[in-house]
Amino acid sequence: MATIYKEFIVEAGAAQVWDALRDFGAVHTRLAPGFLTDCKLDGKGARVVSFSNGLVARELLVGIDEPNRRLAYTITGGQASHHHASAQVFAHGEGRSRFVWITDVLPNELGAYIEPMMAQGGLAMKKTLEKKSPAPSAD
């Protein structure tokens, strides 16, 4: 199994970063615009996200852990026989956060495809989160 680990510091408070991360249906506007071009909730606890490279994925929400500021999801369908990801926000001093994003995927070879996508996604998230967050979506 490939494990891809991304961690970065965000120049924004943990509450603000968590508010954007936990907004599952607005990931394309509040968390990673540009990297993601669209997101639609399917009414079954999942979102269908469109990536800037043309990839479309169905991400099923596994859970939102409010006290620990952690969100987990899995991708269903597609080439992976297993895909589980989580993102978590930690306070990191005054007005700063540490964002940790981890994905486990099988087969192992998919890690070489997913890692650069997560690197690009992390840059988009950092850029977006360091701006003033738009209002939560009504989705």
Image (cartoon, rainbow, N blue to C red):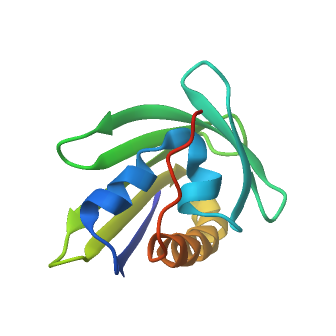
With respect to residue 99, does 135 lie above or below? above
Number of numbered discs: 0
The residue sitting at 30% across, 48% down in the picture is: 70
78 or 107: nearer the eye?
Answer: 78
133 or 49: nearer the eye?
Answer: 133
Q: x, y (%) of residue 63? A: 36, 33
With respect to residue 114, does 138 lie above or below? above
The residue sitting at 51% across, 72% down in the picture is: 122
121 or 13: nearer the eye?
Answer: 13
The residue sitting at 63% across, 19% down in the picture is: 43
Q: x, y (%) of residue 3? A: 43, 62
Quadrant hosting residue 59: top right
Q: x, y (%) of residue 81? A: 60, 39
Q: x, y (%) of residue 4? A: 45, 66
Any part of residue 107 in sight: no
The reply, left or right, for residue 10 in relation to residue 94 is: right
The reply, left or right, for residue 137 in relation to residue 100 is: right
The reply, left or right, for residue 32 in relation to residue 37 is: left
Where does the C terminus fall, quadrant-wise?
top right
